[in-house]
Image: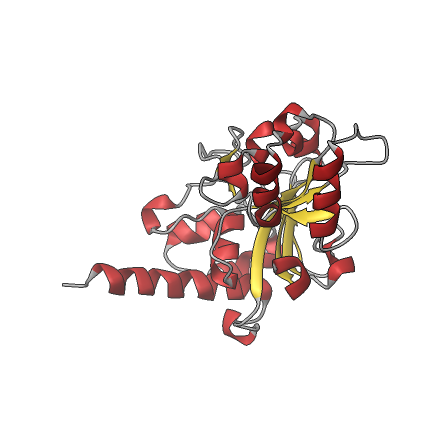
Amino acid sequence: MTSLSTAAADWDRRLADAFGMMLGRPLHEFDPGAVYAAGIGGNLIHELGFDRDAAWVRPQALSGAEPVGWDCPLFDDSPRTPVFDAAGSLFAIPADRDAPALPGPFAAAVAAACFAEGLIRGADLAPLVVEHGVDLGAHPGSWAVFFARLRSDGTLLDAFRAALDTGRTPEDLVPFEAAPDEDWEEALAAVEPPELRAHLGYFLTDGEEGLMPMLDEAPAWGLDAHGCEPVMGWEDGFGQVDLAVIRLSGLVAG
């Protein structure tokens, strides 16, 4: 009888092969020592104000003890909602030049902990809100999420898994019905099982129904200015949702 660990390893191999097909390059050819992250951008997260939701700045979330959930299904036919890692996400403080002022000692401590002007990792922000007793949720407009990182373990495989919402078992796959773009049909035909083929096909469309893949033009949301490099991205055809897997620089990863 196949053990659970063997079955899990086999499934990870199938996922890695499928993600490598999308990249046109096996995952093992990428730097295994780098930190990879999946993130969400696009207009929707801003229009709904989720990038300024107080759930992001709870001490338990900033420390990584609890995830941040967004009750907003992003993909057709999928009831699942995204789960974020506030500790690994990046925050803009102040949110912009017109942002309300924060308490002076706290603002100075945040500025000193930023890895770049006005940008701080959630994990570095966590001890400061506790030390200074500041509830950022009570200071709307003074901060914003700059990079909304989906929860993953830092590997390239898990970043892809988070971005494409494959889950961890075959049972987690979504029976998407969007047809892939014809340019991807031949490569996608080699992916097994059919359920995985249908799931990934949703992310290989022309963007009208499903998401459109991006390699050379994958979004980095400004992180490339800090040494990060996009690996692959996806977008819908309406500017509402962007996804990307990004190799983080040491500066950003912390």
Q: Residue at x 50, y 47 (%)?
A: 151
| Quarter occupied by the C terminus | bottom right
Q: Residue at x 72, y 61 (%)?
A: 216
Q: Nearer the viewer, residue 58 or 212?
A: 58
**Which of the 4 quarters of the picture holds residue 5?**
bottom left
**Left or right: where does residue 147 sit relative to residue 189?**
right
**Left or right: where does residue 124 sit relative to residue 159?**
right
**Which of the 4 quarters of the picture holds residue 125?**
top right
Q: Nearer the viewer, residue 219 or 236?
A: 219
x, y percentage for residue 162?
49, 49
Q: How many marks?
A: 0
Q: Nearer the viewer, residue 239 or 154?
A: 154
Q: Residue furthest left?
A: 1
x, y percentage for residue 63?
51, 44
Is residue 249 visible to the viewer in this orientation of the structure?
no
x, y percentage for residue 102?
74, 31
Picture layout, residue 233 above or below residue 26: above
**Left or right: where does residue 152 sit relative to residue 194?**
right
